[in-house]
């Protein structure tokens, strides 16, 4: 093995280590309040909805994680249902970025889910 091949192998191993650490420890969204309720709603939705599930996830090779939550509207409300199937209202509108991983490490797809937002009219 030449010196150049050894250095390329070291670079590949270093980048693979960085990818593993990023995927396992830093990609999960850390949120509180209404954003946490929306995150739980999105996790329930992607687990139960067939359009977000593929063959790799059914056999256990792939999984999905919510990696980011962004508030898109400050006013108004969004309706969500989490565990008890009752509709709850959260303030504003949210967008979640969901990423699919193979073996919990290698990202292979990404999609976004928006909350159902309705604008409240302020009476004067």
Image (cartoon, rainbow, N blue to C red):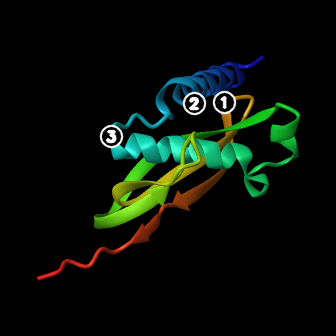
Residue 99 in the image: state x and y as whole percent.
61, 45
Determine whether, in the image, residue 93 is placed left or right of residue 65. left
Q: CA distance from mark 1 to mark 2?
A: 5 Å
Q: Quadrant of the C terminus?
A: bottom left
Residue at the far bottom in the pictured view? 124
Disc 2 marks which residue? 23
Residue 108 visible in the picture: no
Q: Quadrant of the N terminus?
A: top right
Q: CA distance from mark 3 to mark 1?
A: 28 Å
Nearer-the-camera pick, 62 or 95: 95
- Classed neighbour count for the residue bearing mark 3: other residues with Cα under 10 Å, few (<14), some (14–19), many (≥20): few
- Mark 2 and mark 3 lie on one chain; the one further toward the N terminus is 2
Please give the name of the residue rendered at 82% of the width and 32% of the height, measured from the top-left corner.
61
Q: Secondary structure at mark 1?
A: loop
Residue 75 in the image: state x and y as whole percent.
26, 67
Q: Nearer the viewer, mark 2 or mark 3?
A: 3
- Mark 3 and mark 1 lie on one chain; the one further toward the N terminus is 3
Disc 3 marks which residue? 33
Please give the name of the residue rendered at 50% of the width and 54% of the height, measured from the top-left corner.
87
Labels 1 and 2 touching (C-beta < 8 A): yes
Determine whether, in the image, residue 121 is placed left or right of residue 70. left
Nearer-the-camera pick, 101 or 84: 84
């Amino acid at each position: 093995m030449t010196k150049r091949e050894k250095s390329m192998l070291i670079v590949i191993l270093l980048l693979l280590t960085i990818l593993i650490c990023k995927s396992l420890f830093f990609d999960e969204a850390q949120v509180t309040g209404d954003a946490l309720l929306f995150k739980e709603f999105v996790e329930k939705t992607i687990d139960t909805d067939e359009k977000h599930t593929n063959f790799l996830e059914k056999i256990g090779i792939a999984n999905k994680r919510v990696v980011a939550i962004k508030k898109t509207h400050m006013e108004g409300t969004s309706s969500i249902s989490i565990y008890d199937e009752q509709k709850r209202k959260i303030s504003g509108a949210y967008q979640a970025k969901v990423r699919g991983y193979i073996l919990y490490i290698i990202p292979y797809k990404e999609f976004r889910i928006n909350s159902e937002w309705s604008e409240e009219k302020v009476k004067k």
